Amino acid sequence: MIEAKHIGLSINGKTLLNDVNLSVQPGTFTAIAGPNGAGKSSLLKILSHELTHYKGEVRINDVVASSYSVAQLSAVRAVLPQHSHVQFPFTVKQIVEMGRQHFKTTSKNNDALLEEVMELTGVVDWANRNYLTLSGGEQQRVQLTRVLAQVWDQKTFPRYVLLDEPTSSLDIAQQQLIFSLVKKACERNIGVLAVVHDLNQAVQFADHLYFMRNGAVVAQGESKTVFTKPIIEETFCCRVNVYHDPCTNCPYIVPERTTLSTLKTASV
Amino acid sequence: MIAAIPLKQQKVGTVLGVLAVVLVMVMIVALSIGQVTIPVKDIVMIMLYKAGLTAQEPDAVLETVLWSIRLPRIIMTVLIGAALAISGAAMQGLFRNPLVEPGLIGVSSGAALAVVAFVVFGIALIGNSVFGTSVMMPVAAFVGGFVATMLVMKIGQQLGKTNIAVLILGGVAINALAGALMGLVIFYADENQLRMFTFWTLGDLGGATWQKVLITAPVLLLSSVWMLTYQFPLNAIAIGEAEAFHMGVDVERVKKSIVFFSALAVGVSVSLAGIIGFIGLVVPHLVRVIFRADNRLVLPASLLGGPILLLLSDLLARTLVAPTELPIGVVTALIGAPFFIFLLIRANHRNEFNTR
């Protein structure tokens, strides 16, 4: 389990996070939603140990995060950023296998695992293609493959995948594909934490939902129970209606048309 | 036309093997050709004699030319070519920028400033002795280059981390400052000193002696080979610094080591042979454009390719206008620049570089 307790963060005197508590269980998908500037990405950076000057404590599998070495951390968690800008013409396979550099067992096992993950994400046909010639959606899928390859091995301890708005520039088919793949990872004792912008997607895929606003958690719980009109309206300061979709058996929201006057009352 | 071959991992060994064979062949040619031609048969004879494997005494003139002049020069050229090329390759990977060359972090300009100051003021102080020019000038170059790089490193430090953008800007600032100070010093230089300095900045491999080679070889070899070990970290950094950290790379340590070792390698090279441009920029590019960007190939192939290119350039430099020599820096740029432009135009059509 990743457990963050009383996390506080301020940069240049501005408080970005204030007493945030959060936990990610292995084998489940946890999503964080909230308006821009709520501190979601900062929280993710703290959990991945990119930011280290925070208050509070992060424990990964019951061990304090700061006592892990950089290499040890890479064995328990992988991170997919919003965008990766690759500068040189690597092939798809070269990018994917970088995720496995530290955990090569035998080259035969390694190749089999790479093959398995690439097959799963559907990038195996592009293995020898130049990454720079792929479209944005294809590139993101390759990056996800790299991230999954890093933690795919069944180990004695649970692993985690942290995703920061992994689908922000993708079309809906690609978005659904990415989330389904992430969901597959949960079956391998991997805990997933994702910052998600699309609320309907969050409730459709996540087991557990956190709503954040102004650096604090507004509400959290089992996704379908916290996905309510009052919580969403409070989090986003936006009038919404929540319906139920019988096909997916999921709630979904439709935001009300915003007029300038409602915007003003919302911000008060 | 050179085709870009999609390179599988197994083929890396083949490419490196071919490059190694080419390097040995070029070395033999470079040993053989010059103002005095030494047939390959005699090269072998002299080598065997020196190794104590044959008692048959070789031609004394050929022996002197080969053993005292050409061999140290060839060895020094190989070491410098390797050091410059792998430093360039490592720094391009580290800075995630294909336009970077070692000069960017101030090594060359710091060294140049130290040398011009030494030529104008230092020689006046200790006299124009052999000791002064052959020992103190390289030492000044090395110290100048190293101090400049450490300054740039210091400027690039923010909150205990190295900020690459600030580091590059720091390099630009230090280069400009060194250039201005050089201008000031040159203001006080006389004709002779100016000529001496100008030739130094164009590079010269002619000053090689066994003594110099033996002193500097360990440093050059060690720093070059050490940089070879950064193949995976540099590949990971090519995806992004944060991504590399996520994949288990101690990015901060990698940055410091590579800047330090390339400053060391380039500093020593500059102190031996003056400023030789282009090798550090072009060789890694040749490897990347002809093959692939994977640093598991780019680093070792640069280590072998740098010496090949520098040996060939040096061969031209000392044969084209014999009995005198062209400055090596002129030759590397004269050959390198047009070829590089050709590659860039071609790469442009094939989206070899990320233009976003």
Image (spheres, rainbow, N blue to C red):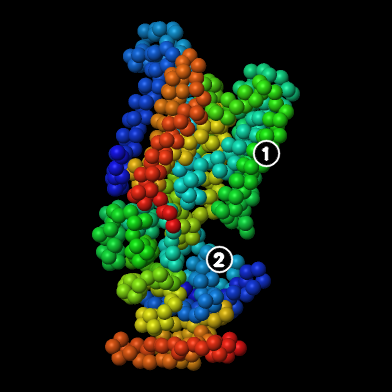
Which residue matches tag 2? Answer: A51
Looking at the rendered structure, the kind of residue marked 2 is Leu
The tag on residue B180 is 1
Foreground residue among B31 and A267: A267
Mark 1 crowdedness (10 Å alpha carbons): few <14, some 14-19, many ≥20: few
- Residue B291: x and y in percent read 33, 44
Against B22, is A99 above or below?
A: below
Residue occupying image coordinates x 38% and y 77%: A28
Foreground residue among B56 and A119: A119
- Residue B311: x and y in percent read 43, 27
- Residue B19: x and y in percent read 34, 34
Residue occupying image coordinates x 45% and y 50%: B234
Chain designation of label 1? B
Residue occupying image coordinates x 62% and y 42%: B175
Against B4, is B139 above or below?
A: above
Q: Report the Cα–Cα distance between label 2 and label 1.
A: 40 Å
Foreground residue among B267 and B321: B321
Against B292, is B191 above or below?
A: above
Q: Which of marks 2 and 1 is in front?
A: 1
Mark 2 crowdedness (10 Å alpha carbons): few <14, some 14-19, many ≥20: few
* Residue farthest to the right, as pictured: B125
User: Judging from the image, what secondary structure is the residue with disc 2 in?
Assistant: loop
Q: Can residue A11 be seen in this view?
A: yes
Residue occupying image coordinates x 37% and y 76%: A27
- Residue A75: x and y in percent read 42, 62
Same chain for mark 2 and mark 1? The answer is no
User: Judging from the image, what secondary structure is the residue with disc 1 in?
Assistant: helix
Quarter of the C terminus of chain B within the rendering = bottom left
Image quarter for residue B186? Answer: top right
Give the side of residue A131 with respect to residue B86, left or right. left
